[in-house]
Amino acid sequence: MIVSHLLSGRHRERGFTLIELMVVVAIVGILSAVAYPAYTDYIRRGRLPEAFTLLADYRAKMEQYYQDNKNYGSTGGTVCATDSTASKWNAFVGGDYFDMACVTSNSGQNFLLTATGKAGSVTAGYAYTIDQDGAKKTTTFKGVAVTASCWLSKTSTC
């Protein structure tokens, strides 16, 4: 039966043609070109709250420090929380995705906390600040310098 089927010319090869395969590859390429940037943006937005949490936490600690010392740091310099009572937290250690920094001004009566996205991570190109008055600002968003008076996460408007 098989031999007669092959000899009769009715046998048809099974599989995909080159054109069918190229269409599938093109569709997968288009979908991945759209999906990958959306996915990385989703991951990035999921990591931004780390900066907001660190800034809020350090701001509260700075206010407690001010209550004890009547300043935010050295009156002769620009270092935050210089008293030995703050030695457990005043290194302003960042998280997994953000580096932290703090400077004082006005003879230790003002401070500025900054969270900057770590180089090489999806948060690179993002920088947020908060000061002694609780004023939140975004200074860099998606790698572009901005002057937003809020912490941006999705769009470049407050």
Image (cartoon, grey):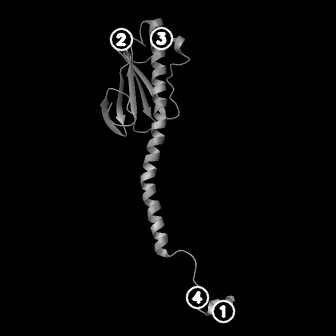
Quadrant into which the C terminus falls: top left
Question: Is residue 47 among what the camera can see?
Answer: yes
Up the image or down, 48 lies above or below 120; here it is above
Q: CA distance from mark 3 to mark 2?
A: 15 Å
Up the image or down, 31 lies above or below 105; here it is below
Q: CA distance from mark 1 to mark 4?
A: 9 Å
Which image quadrant for residue 138?
top left
Which of pointers 2 and 4 indicates the residue nearer the eye? Answer: 4
Closer to the chain start, of discs 2 and 4, is 4
Per the image, the residue denoted by label 3 is 65
Q: Amino acid at mark 1?
A: Ser
Q: Amino acid at mark 2?
A: Ser
Which of pointers 1 and 2 indicates the residue nearer the eye? Answer: 1
Per the image, the residue denoted by label 4 is 10
Provide residue 19's location: percent of width, then percent of height. 46, 74
Up the image or down, 147 lies above or below 65; here it is below
- Element carrying mark 4: loop
Provide residue 4's location: percent of width, then percent of height. 66, 92
Q: CA distance from mark 1 to mark 2?
A: 100 Å
- Element carrying mark 2: loop
Closer to the chain start, of discs 1 and 3, is 1
Which of pointers 3 and 2 indicates the residue nearer the eye? Answer: 3
Q: Nearer the viewer, residue 65 or 11?
A: 11
Q: Amino acid at mark 3?
A: Tyr
Quick check: marks 2 and 4 in contact, CB under 8 Å? no
Residue at 48% across, 41% down: 43
* Image-based side of 118 in relation to 13, left or right: left
